[in-house]
Image (tube, rainbow, N blue to C red):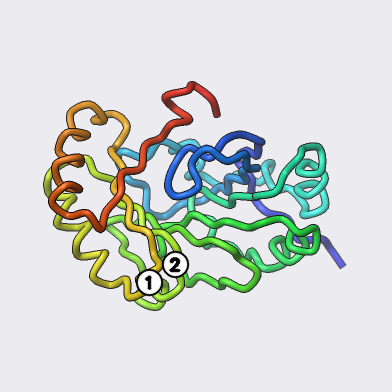
Amino acid sequence: MKEISYPIKESFYSIQGEGHFYGIAAYFIRFEGCNIKCDWCDTKESWNIKKKDFVPIHKIIANINNYKVKTVIITGGEPMMWDLYPLIKKLKKKEYRIHIETSGFYPIKEKYVDWITISPKKIKRPIQENYKKINELKIIISDENDFFFAEEQANYVKSKNCFLFLQPEWTNIFRIIPKIISYIKENPKWRISLQIHKMLNIP
């Protein structure tokens, strides 16, 4: 039986720079493939799926074994385009903590997943069932209209344990941060998320 492979754009051991777990060491697996393709995406190189980039599960895990890893973050692209269960099941057997970052456009099969972050996109919004499963909602803010979108998305989240983050779009960061700070002071259910890995110039 042929082993399952996935299209992996890159994988690396680094620091989580965003959201609730910013600052922790984590191993990142960035999947190829995305049908949303936001104009301001900072990983456009992950949109296209290349046959040469498919990696079998045993090699993915072997690469992780080279590092002192506790947390594995699966991101993209859009990782939920793929059936991740075979990979996640084997990662969990090694007692890794599994985080997934997704747009929420595809169904989230959360078995064995410890943390789910949705970063919704206006052009293809999350399916409703996914809002019940998430631990973190992260809205990218590039202009004032995005605050209305953020509130719309937050209204779908019913769990009081879900963290709500506003994150400045990187190319507009210095223009938009004062607006985010003012907004959070008026709406303290939100927190600010900064891409500290970019500030520190690390992957």
Task: Tell me where residue 119 sits by quadrant.
Answer: bottom left
According to the picture, the residue beneath numbered tag 1 turns out to be 131
Does 2 sit above or below residue 10? below
How many numbered marks does the figure carry?
2
> Residue flagged by tag 2: what amino acid is it?
Ile
In this rendered view, identify the residue nearer to me: 95 or 9. Answer: 95
Give the label on residue 100, or none: none
Image position of 192 (left or right of 98): left
In this rendered view, identify the residue nearer to me: 152 or 182. Answer: 182
Q: Residue at x 20, y 41 (%)?
A: 180
Residue situated furthest top in the rendering: 201
> Residue flagged by tag 1: what amino acid is it?
Tyr
- Within 10 Å of disc 2 (Cα), the crowding (few <14, some 14-19, many 20+) is many
Residue 114, percent from left and from top: 59, 63
Q: Residue at x 23, y 70 (%)?
A: 155
Whether residues under marks 2 and 1 lie with C-beta atoms below 8 angstroms apart, the answer is yes
Q: Residue at x 69, y 62 (%)?
A: 88
Does 112 sit above or below residue 65? below
In the picture, the quarter occupied by the N terminus is: bottom right
Give the label on residue 134, or none: 2
